[in-house]
Image (cartoon, rainbow, N blue to C red):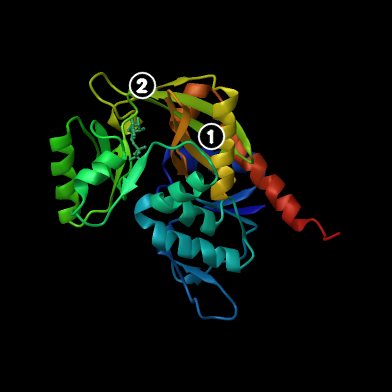
Amino acid sequence: MKIAVLSREPRNYSTRRLVEVARARGHEVEVLDTLRCYMNIASHNPSIHYEGVELGDYDAVIPRIGASITFYGTAVLRQFEMMSTMALNSSVAISRSRDKLRAMQLLSRHGIGLPITGYAHSTHDVPDLIKMVGGAPLVVKLLEGTQGIGVVLCETHKAAESVIEAFIQTNNNILVQEYIREANGADIRCLVVNGKVVAAMRRQAQPGEFRSNLHRGGTAEAIKITPEERATAVQAAKIMGLDVAGVDILRSARGPLVLEVNSSPGLQGVEAASGKDVAGKIIEFLELKASRKHKPAE
Ligand code: ADP
């Protein structure tokens, strides 16, 4: 196959692994900087240009679109889709999962366990918003945040009120969320490929920190997940419409709670912790998806 990887970071571990594995399996692979792709969206003959030339046809595209460029990145991916290039994850599914509110509303509608979460636009009813999620301690999250940035634990009602008001008044979109104390600063990342959890890791926050992000100094180790956690991860990816996803789960007293479904999960931490060849599973799946697409209609 001829494969395009949409990535701004060709040297990034995940990009390198996917390229390496795909080449080793005999595919032709090019890494394209998502933001350097440009296109004529009104043409009857959709095309994409790159560094002054029109791109040829690709059989498949692997989107690795960072959260900060979701809008443009999904537009580029959509253009590939219009050119009948098969995408590892579709542009619609990526947009769906990147909109944290929309994603949580969808997951909740399908009965997936979630931390109690509130969302408000105005500062008028902050005390009731706090009450709604069960009072302090609670977690306030910037909607656009990633890697734990903008995730704040407010221990008291007063602190929660000040933080929420400050965020809203500075025009930040935030979520207010029940704090899952019994998670003990740990969460579970499940890598789902084609409806199966192919690898999982437990991330543990540093002492004194509740955010387990590896970028925040968290450590990762292999973990055996429960059948309930496995089913939750698989179902969450399915609801988002993502064939490849990283599903973050908190272990709570009332069972697994989904924090986020990530459409471009990093591979470094999870491959190291689990010892699994996740990139290999992803490329194998891409081959399968392409073969299904080319199967003549019955
Ligand atoms: P980001 O998308 O920026 O990583 P998350 O919502 O995943 O933000 O939060 C970062 C980390 O903070 C999580 O991995 C988890 O360890 C911790 N965390 C987030 N929300 C809660 C919560 N409601 N209760 C307990 N811990 C939480």
Q: Position of residue 128 (x, y in %)?
A: 24, 45
Image depth: mark 2 or mark 1 in front = 2
Residue type at numbered disc 1: Leu
Q: Is residue 260 left or right of residue 56?
A: left
Q: Position of residue 189 (x, y in %)?
A: 47, 31
Residue ID at (24%, 30%):
137
Q: Viewer-proximal residue, 76 or 169?
A: 169
Q: Position of residue 85 (x, y in %)?
A: 62, 61
Element type at mark 1: strand
Marking on residue 200: none
Q: Is residue 283 left or right of residue 31?
A: right
| Residue 289 seen in the figure | yes
Marking on residue 191: 1
| Residue 263 seen in the figure | no
Decide if ligand 1 comes within 8 Å of the CB at mark 1.
Answer: no
Q: Tell me the residue that label 2 is attached to.
A: 182
Residue type at numbered disc 2: Glu
Q: Residues within 10 Å of mark 1 (few under 14, many from 20)?
A: many
Q: Viewer-proximal residue, 14 or 109?
A: 109
Residue ID at (25%, 25%):
209
Residue ID at (26%, 45%):
129
Q: Residues within 10 Å of mark 2 (few under 14, many from 20)?
A: few
Q: Is residue 150 left or right of residue 182?
A: left
Element type at mark 2: helix
